[in-house]
Amino acid sequence: MQRTAVAGKREKGDTHITLSTRCGANEIVITSPVLDLFGPQIRTAVEQTLQQLQISGVLILVEDNQALDCVTQARLRCAVQRLQRGVEA
């Protein structure tokens, strides 16, 4: 059974994260108006946070709106906690 959790807002300076369980390796999908400039940095922030939390087997949709790395990481941590508790929103 697939479970999903979200965190964040779709406002400038924030990031909206959707996290879903899946079979296999993690998959990260990023959309951002600054993807060409900061896409690798956003991906690294997400990968490092997942590694720190020892999370695998998830699909992460990152809708970045020019957020700082610390905001992206906090939103991802929140989504992970919600997913683990079974809270969808």
Image (spheres, rainbow, N blue to C red):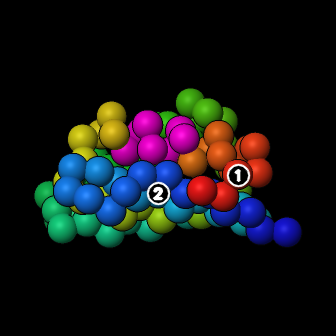
In this view, the residue in front, 71 or 26, is 71
Looking at the image, residue 15 lies above or below residue 4: above
Place of residue 60 in the rendered image (x, y in percent of width and height, measured from the top left): 53, 60
What are the residue bounds of the magenta stretch?
A: 72-78
Q: Residue at x 32, y 69 (%)?
A: 31
Residue 25 in view: no
Amino acid bearing label 1: Val
Q: Nearer the viewer, mark 2 or mark 1?
A: 1
In this view, the residue in front, 25 or 60, is 60
Looking at the image, residue 7 lies above or below residue 3: above
- The answer to whether mark 2 and mark 1 are in CB contact below 8 A is no
Looking at the image, residue 20 lies above or below residue 70: below
Place of residue 54 in the rendered image (x, y in percent of width and height, measured from the top left): 66, 36
- Helix, strand or loop: magenta stretch: helix
Instruction: Name which of mark 2 and mark 1 comes first in the sequence.
Output: 2
The answer to which quarter of the image holds residue 15 is bottom left
What's the mark number on residue 17?
2
The crowding category of the residue bearing disc 1, from other C-alpha atoms within 10 Å (few below 14, some 14 to 19, many at least 20), is: some
Q: Is residue 21 magenta?
A: no
Q: Secondary structure at mark 2?
A: strand
Q: Secondary structure at mark 1?
A: loop
Q: Is residue 75 magenta?
A: yes
Amino acid bearing label 2: Ile
* 51 with respect to 62 (left or right): right
Place of residue 18 in the rendered image (x, y in percent of width and height, measured from the top left): 53, 61
**Total count of labels:** 2
* 46 with respect to 77 (left or right): left
- Name the residue carrying label 1: 87
Residue 76 in view: yes
Q: Residue at x 45, y 44 (%)?
A: 75
